[in-house]
Image (spheres, rainbow, N blue to C red):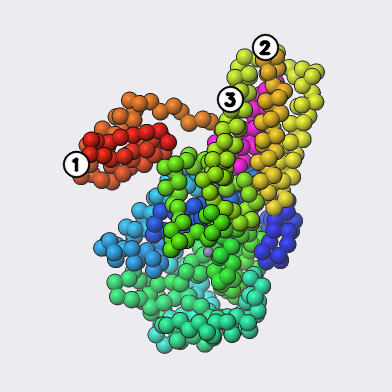
Amino acid sequence: MKIFNTLSGRKEEFVPLEPGKVKMYVCGPTVYNFIHIGNARPMIVFDTIRRYLEYKGYDVNFVSNFTDVDDKIIKKAMEEGVDSSEISERYIAECRADMEAMNVRPATIHPKATQEIDGMIDLIDTLVRGGHAYRAEDGTVYFRTSSFKEYGKLSHKNLDELQSGFRELKVTGEEGKESPSDFVLWKPKKEGEPYWESPWCEGRPGWHIECSAMSRRYLGEQIDIHGGGEDLIFPHHENEIAQSEAASGKEFARYWMHNGFLNIDNKKMSKSLGNFFTVREISEKFDLQVLRFFMLSAHYRSPLNFSAELMEASKNGLERIHNGLDKLRELEEKAGEEELLEREKVPYEESRQLVAKYEAAMEDDFNTADAVSAVFELVKLGNSTADGESSRAYVKALRETLERLCGVLGIVTERKKEVLDEEVEELIAARTQARKDRNFALADEIRQKLSDMGILLEDTREGVKWKRA
Ligand code: AMP
Ligand code: ZN
């Protein structure tokens, strides 16, 4: 199996640290809002990679954090006049709901930064004692980049260039730095912000130290795969390497994997351009299975353009797979002959070759685009060779293969059950009652449940109207 390693800039054979086991860490979202479809890309990509590794028999220990202390969270908490934990807990719950709807399995563990402060303080302490970090007068602790000779090795930047680049960029409040490329490990508290005791000052951790500390606690000093979006290569992952390797003296992660960016209408997705969608918004128009299928239609390292047309095409593609499976299931039930027929031997062999093609694609740096086309070829094979005369052995083999290959991609092969009108009416009545009782949390929950069932609501003067998505 080959993996493109950002560190070396080429594809490398995958050799885990311990045979049969994979330790994997993927940087998770900062939880101050609903996740957007850009955040969904690494979730879907790394969930698929994890599924494939498990399919190959590896025991995968997968850790992904929630950043629940951050300027944006604190700002939102201040705006709403609530505690910042209320904001982060709310959006962690929403993120988990979106993940479930995209069939992204929960990680083995999802640590939260605020629960891991001790580990971060311990790591910073090791760095300070080793001369890799220092405390400035105001209590801020910085990482001393000049103490880590390999700084820049991931992003292929050189420290001198970096320092001259940074010189222009004076950050207010960071005057205590020895060098412009040094970065914050711990910062003093500000009025009204959450803070923790530490040997340096009352304050909170910088962002980068979070992942180094959590990865160390749950996976140990060395891991196999570290992943995230390509925007994290510099400075976040570069800084993680510096912190972890300066502290342990060992190589932190063997393979660094980065997904390409998701753009909208060929432009960078951004709030200011107004071309910005949350996963929740997309769920009002499409089943999130379609979003997942769309993401897998491209190689994970390529940039991917989001558009309504491409989503429609993915919806149709998914429908083709479901129709193919429906047909096979029906034929399997009706089949008269049990054993494989003579005329089925060649197409059966072709189906085995398609499995090999699928695996070869996935083993070439997880080329899901080619794996998906092998799945389509299998559907086509079923459509053209399976009929009322087919043996049960043949249609069953095709059905099971298709289900298994789809399952590894996280594509749900069971159709959603038909939603009955009465069921919808009952839920709408319960929501109306919840609103009368001013129980808005329950009302929102019911609206979400309906949305997951593919039912869209519109509140009008004449009452609630609904339609199927
Ligand atoms: P953040 O909450 O901004 O730290 O992002 C969480 C994850 O989403 C990181 O791995 C980012 O690299 C990734 N990410 C953010 N925006 C995009 C995008 N437009 N396309 C792909 N990945 C993204
Ligand atoms: Zn990280």
User: Residue 139: which quarter of the image?
Assistant: bottom left
Residue 193 visible in this rendered orientation of the protein? yes
- Can you say whether 188 is above or below 400 in the image? below
Pick the front one: 436 or 29? 436
Q: Position of residue 280 (x, y in %)?
A: 42, 47
Q: Is residue 272 magenta?
A: no
Q: Indicate the amino acid at tag 1.
A: Asp
Coordinates of residue 162 in the picture (x, y in percent): 60, 80
Which residue bears the numbered disc 1? 437
In the image, taking residue 317 as reference, residue 338 lies left or right, namely right
Work out whether residue 43 or residue 239 is closer to the camera in this orientation and state it.
Answer: 43
Would residue 59 be visible to someone looking at this image? Answer: no
Q: Position of residue 233 (x, y in %)?
A: 59, 67
Q: Amino acid at mark 2?
A: Gly
Image height of 42 relative to 182, above or below: above
Q: What secondary structure is marked by label 3?
A: helix
Q: CA distance from mark 1 to mark 3?
A: 44 Å
Amino acid under disc 3:
Asp
Q: Nearer the viewer, residue 22 or 433?
A: 433
Identify the residue position indicated by label 2 in the image: 336
* N-terminal label among 2 and 3: 3
Q: Residue at x 70, y 38 (%)?
A: 374
Residues at marks 2 and 3, CA–CA distance in whole angstroms: 18 Å
Q: Main secondary structure of the magenta part?
A: helix
Please rate how many residues cluster around mark 2, counting C-alpha atoms within 10 Å: few if below 14, some from 14 to 19, many from 20.
few
Query: Which secondary structure, mark 2?
Result: loop
**Which portion, as a residue range, is magenta?**
393-412
